[in-house]
Amino acid sequence: MLRMEKEHADQMVAHSLQEDPNECCGILTGSDHVVSKVHRITNTAKSPFRYLMDPQEQLNVMLESERAGQEILAFYHSHTHSPAYPSPTDVRMAQQSGWLGDDVFYVLVSLEDRDDPAIHAFHVQEDGEIVEEELEVSR
């Protein structure tokens, strides 16, 4: 299970809406599966169908979180017109990145219903299996 405060969920939704019609992306850091910070990352693909994290920004977050004693808990991105579920492209990109299994969550924000954006968390296994995980958002 991944846990976060409503403030963190709101930050991801705001980021998604600001980048619309393109996908947004970012990293969630914290410890013990509890998010403590949302890090926005530039989507260098500037696309409504895929994202590529700016490599320098991604490295900066990794170094910053290591210095702070935090972990990379999740990568997040938005789907502007489809459900909050990993696409075949998302799975392929996860497999190519090597960030697989239970070590990292993939969090998706769907703007399919802009009045009620959906947020879901997943693990992507080495074989491409998608496992939905519980996401607890507390107030």
Image (cartoon, rainbow, N blue to C red):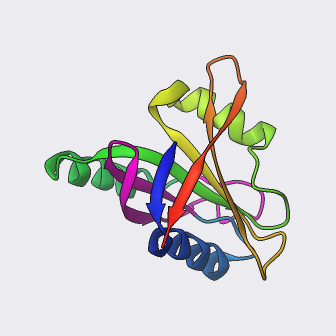
Is 44 part of what is drawn in magenta? yes
- At 50% from the left and 75% from the top, the residue drawn is 11
The answer, for residue 98, to whether it is visible in the render is no
Q: Is residue 47 above or below residue 55?
A: below
10 or 82, nearer to the observer: 10
Magenta span: 25-52
- At 50% from the left and 72% from the top, the residue drawn is 6
Q: Which residue lies furthest to the front in this view?
A: 139
Q: In this view, does 39 lie above or below 84?
A: below
Place residue 22 in its image quadrant. Answer: bottom right
107 or 34, nearer to the observer: 34
Left or right: residue 39 versus residue 131 is: left
Rendered location of residue 3, percent (x, y) = 46, 53
Q: How many marks?
A: 0
Left or right: residue 4 versus residue 124 is: left
- At 84% from the left and 69% from the top, the residue drawn is 112
Is 111 part of what is drawn in magenta? no
27 or 48, nearer to the observer: 27
Rendered location of residue 61, percent (x, y) = 31, 54
Place residue 123 in its image quadrant. Answer: top right
